[in-house]
Image: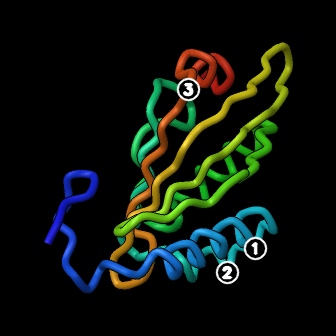
Amino acid sequence: MGEFLGRTLHPADRADPASLYALGEEFRAAQTGKDPVRLRALLHDEVEWVLPGDNAVSGTARGIDAIFERFAAMAAYGLDIHIEHVTAGRDAVALILHNTGHQDDRAIDEHLVSTLALRDGRIVRIETYLTDIDMMNAYFTR
């Protein structure tokens, strides 16, 4: 057993890097295509998405519906999420993203990373790492 993001991973949670990469590509296709049925099938019922900052979309979203609410809130702010690369390790997937958007007098242009941890072959935790938290806070003002 190992640990990832403070959680114990059991051997059954591990997949070969090719399978993890395929899951990451499936996530990218579902998110890019705005395909809620496909995306929902990838998410574990107990999924969490941790997003740093102090703004309208930050914090921990718990559950599939909360994940979709966060995506909807980001879209309402005019955010364009572009997954540039999918990388896979032993226990998780990392997505390298470039998010851009314009809202009133605010703009965002940020590169970031989100990791996807699995349980039972589905995404149970998304952890996002930002390059500019202040820009994110300014863009997603409450």
User: How many callouts does the rendering have?
Assistant: 3
Relative to 47, is 57 above or below?
above
* Label whose residue precedes the other's in the sequence (3 or 2): 2
Crowd class of label 2 (few under 14; some 14 to 19; many from 20; radius 10 Å):
some
Residue at figure coordinates x 26%, y 57% from the top left: 4
- Proximity of marks 2 and 1: CB atoms separated by less than 8 Å: yes
Residue at figure coordinates x 44%, y 33% from the top left: 52
> Is disc 3 placed on a helix, strand or loop?
loop
x, y percentage for residue 15? Answer: 38, 81
Could you tell me the amino acid type at mark 1? Asp
* Label whose residue precedes the other's in the sequence (3 or 1): 1
> Is disc 2 placed on a helix, strand or loop?
helix
Quickly name the residue at label 3.
131
Residue at figure coordinates x 53%, y 22% from the top left: 133
Residue at figure coordinates x 81%, y 38% from the top left: 78
x, y percentage for residue 106? Answer: 78, 17
Quickly name the residue at label 1.
35
Q: Is residue 77 left or right of residue 5?
A: right
Q: Nearer the viewer, residue 94 or 71?
A: 94
